[in-house]
Image: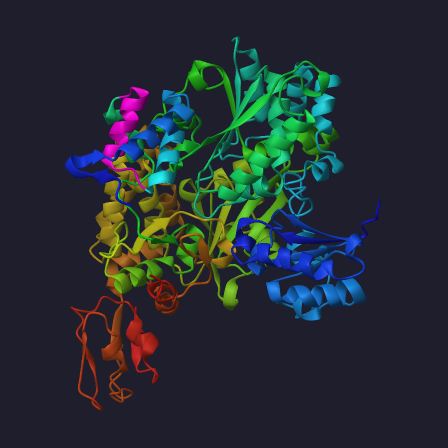
Amino acid sequence: MSIVCEKDKLQKQHQLRIKEICQGFGGEHSELINILHACQGYFGYLPAEVQEEIGMQINMPVSKVFGVVTFYSFFTMKPKGRFPISICTGTACYVRGADKLVDEFQRELGIDVGQTTGDGKFSISTLRCVGACGLAPVVMVGDKTYGHVSPNKVKKILKEYKKEE
Amino acid sequence: MTKINQHILTCGGTGCRASESKILAARLKEELKDSEISQNVKVVESGCFGFCEKGPIVKILPDNTFYTQVKPKDAKEIVEEHILKGRKVERLLFRDPNTNELIDESKSMGFYKKQIRIATRNCGFIDPENIGEYVAREGYEALGKALFELEPADIIKTVKDSGMRGRGGGGFPTGFKWELTAKSESDKKYVVCNADEGDPGAFMDRSILEGDPHSVLEAMAICGFAVGADEGLIYIRAEYPLAIERLKIAIKQAEDVGVIGDDILGSGFNFNISLKYGAGAFVCGEETALIHSMEGLRGEPTLKPPFPAERGFFDKPTNVNNVETFANIPAIINKGAEWYASVGTEKSKGTKVFALAGKINNVGLIEVPMGTTLREVIFDIGGGIKDGKKFKAVQTGGPSGGCLTEKHLDTPIDFDNLLAIGSMMGSGGMVVLDEDDCMVSMAKFYLEFTVEESCGKCAPCRIGNKRLLETLEKITNGNGTMDDLDLLRIQGGVIKDTSLCGLGQTSPNPILSTLDNFWDEYVEHVEENKCRAGQCKSMLKYVIIEDECVGCTACARVCPTGAITGNKKEVHFITQDLCIKCGACMDKCNFESIELIA
């Protein structure tokens, strides 16, 4: 979703939402991570404007907010695709060929890990262990888990989503 | 009241849920609804059974029938045949891969025979979302005993006498830690449960939280009473949605019945528990980093002392224990220190939960007494190597551990033995490797992880690991020299000696242990430009066997880089400079005319 209007300013309604979230956590500095989780849950990502607003709301320098956002891999400053693809690269999946899946998804979609396709449909990321090691290698698209994925199944998985508009 | 005489347990852990176990449970309930005995049969979504390889699992009590790989469409047959007619559904029973025998109950499976379950005593037996089932299995009895029969000092003594050591990785004696916190004087103290399980390929803590959340809550309250804390915090990864959900339900239920909250069971003792979320940083498993993260800061570790037991969360004394450590506590209080100390080895008491993964037949979660050998774990419980391949190594301790080989298979597993042979217990990840795994690549894999996860605070870890990785990349790209191998050892040694926290102090372990145990393989990479496992792409070469190629053009069409040329019905050719070694041509060729040269 586009949350920024002209002149890089947040839309009013989004500003209000951030204010609500911060107040919900008492505006405490120690709640910053929970606030960020809530904001990312709402916006899908944490662009600079959102971080600035959070800093204003809880009276914390935006540099500190940025420091925390960039420290943790769960937080992202770029919007993900509508169908975010997460390839597990935990050890169990790695030894069962997860690296080949990364190559295959990158090739099929023409983007690298961490990028989103031009139409905003797919993004690729890797994550460390979803805990379904019995199904290794595992790929998640949104909330759906695919187990025992081999490179030649990649096309089929993408096809399921490509036809969806 | 109707008497329930049969239970259908379905696995509701993350792994099995990914294979539609939730739909399966719903389907079973649906099927039962129409039958006349629906009142006497109960479907329970329990925690992890451990046998993740063959999930989703369905277990029927009281006869312990163990069905594997059950799909929602099998629900009808299970209800009609097993529940109504009392006939086992043979095609869903587990077949022993070695003897080819059908095994109709879990107790006679090799996977379960050698296991002793203490920390995971309730996983796969109870409905984790129902406090009543936990209570029925001695739940919250230990808390009652602690509050009304024991003094805080007695509890600490029991934990000390049990010989329990922290299951998070370090192996620090738990009772001693509690004593330190108890002795620190302060108006406010905290008990923290470390559920930031970041070791890739390990899922012990998650399974305990999903399968038996109350055992952790109970233990935290006991710990709070023993050390004088009235607030508990669980620091959990945001990537564990199911565990978070079950914990929230458990806390609510425990508060409702009065075993958590103010004036617990009328004893006057207050203990409240809340959740704090992690956001994906491996270093937050280190307790000082974890505390900073809970304070809303970057999760960077700080020098110890002061230990968290003296100055932790908001500068107040804080006792931090791992999930598995806590899960053992109620059993120790109930059954006594002596009982617990009777299991295990001289210096490592009790059991250890391991997440078995990799090239092994029975991927899953197991709990074995300390002192069990690697061979028993891998071959008896794990069912040996997948696809009949040869065992090559087992990696324990995750990114901080090392790779052990054939010669270590008969070593009894405990904290000290693993350290002595160049690995460590770690949190309990155990990844089995076979002959197709390149040990240099494996070391590189772990180092990539460490480099990504290094918090950047201290130079040895931030810069040193990056240099180590570059050297490893040089070797796997075929540009290494023998000097580089010496350099790896020197750099690794410096990083170990000078890093601030456990992450950096152990990060070179995967390299150092593979250098020790697989020296030949490193030398091959350097001197012969050869990767015997065929994993290092730069050392591979795909070539077309001229005599076999019929010129069908299938390979040229599938090649993503246009590296394959040739006319129809003529022999094709691969231009090596353009080849990215994806192997697509080899997969596509119907005439087996493409060869991989390692």
Q: Is B151 inside the magenta-drawn segment?
A: no
Residue at horizontal 50 percent and vertical 39 percent from the top: B427
Front residue (pair B343, B55): B55
Residue A51: x %, y % from top left: 27, 31
Quadrant for the C terminus of chain B, please.
bottom left
Left or right of B449 in this view: B541: left
Q: In the displayed orientation, state which residue is furthest to the bottom.
A: B569
Q: Is A53 inside the magenta-drawn segment?
A: yes
Residue B276: x %, y % from top left: 46, 29
Q: In the displayed orientation, state which residue is furthest to the front.
A: A12
Q: Is B233 drawn above or below residue B580 in the view shown?
A: above
Q: Is B282 drawn above or below residue B69 in the view shown?
A: above
The answer to whether one can see residue B460 in this image is no
The answer to whether one can see residue B302 in this image is yes
Quadrant for the N terminus of chain B, please.
top right
Front residue (pair B417, A161): A161
Q: Is A157 drawn above or below residue B462 in the view shown?
A: below
Colouring used for the render: rainbow
Residue B564: x %, y % from top left: 20, 77
Left or right of B45 in this view: B144: right
Front residue (pair B159, B534): B159
Residue B135: x %, y % from top left: 73, 35
Region in magenta: A45-60
When asked about the image quadrant of residue B273, the answer is top right
Majority secondary structure of magenta residues: helix
Q: How many marks?
A: 0
